[in-house]
Amino acid sequence: MVRKRLSDDEIMTALTKLEHWKRTEDGRWIERRYHFKTFLQAIDFVQKIAEIAEEKAHHPLIQIDYRVVSLKLSSWQAGGLTDLDMEEAQTFDAVYDRMGVSSNE
């Protein structure tokens, strides 16, 4: 099922609930950086994110820079952001919070 692309107003409203997520300049993605105390914590987080993405068949772009993991979300089929991106961002934040890692954002 192709999800409906969100309007600019819907995106701005959704981002008010996603404290550390930001919209990219082109408006087609949201992104966030997660900070970890160790490299292995960062890798553990990526593994958890990968499992969620596989379950939902919705995969973020992932960049690992030692103890920092950057995620970008967008819905290719919709040509931009959908409610699925916002839901997944919330899920990823919950995983990070459960890991008990203090953020330096």
Image (tube, rainbow, N blue to C red):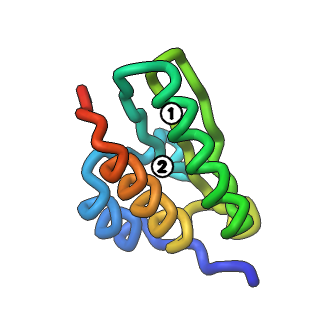
Which mark's residue is nearer the viewer, 1 or 2?
Answer: 1
Q: Secondary structure at mark 2?
A: strand
Q: Picture coordinates of residue 62 (x, y %)?
A: 62, 37
Please identify the quarter of the rendering in which residue 78 is found: bottom right
Residue under label 2? 30
Q: In the rendered image, which residue does mark 1 sit on?
A: 70
Q: Is residue 21 above or below residue 63?
A: below
**Left or right placement of residue 105 versus residue 26 in this view:** left
| Residue 22 locus on image (x, y percent) | 37, 45
- Image location (x, y in percent) of residue 20: 30, 45
10 Å crowding of disc 1: few (<14), some (14-19), many (20+): some
Residue placed furthest toward the bottom:
1
84 shown above or below 2: above
Q: How many marks?
A: 2
Q: Residue furthest top?
A: 66
Quadrant that contains the C terminus: top left
- 77, 27: nearer the viewer: 77
> Residue flagged by tag 1: what amino acid is it?
Ser
Query: Dividing the picture into quarters, in which one does residue 11 lie?
Result: bottom left
Tell me, for residue 18, which label it has, or none.
Answer: none
Q: Residue at x 47, y 39 (%)?
A: 25
Hey, which quadrant is residue 14 in on the image?
Answer: bottom left
Q: Please give the name of the residue rendered at 51% of the width and 40% of the height, measured from the top-left corner.
A: 45
Q: Residues within 10 Å of mark 2 (few under 14, many from 20)?
A: many
Give whichever of discs 1 and 2 has the lower sequence position. Answer: 2
Q: Nearer the viewer, residue 66 or 32?
A: 66
Inter-mark Cα distance, 1 to 2: 11 Å
Q: Quarter of the image containing the N terminus?
A: bottom right
Residue found at x 61% / y 56% = 74
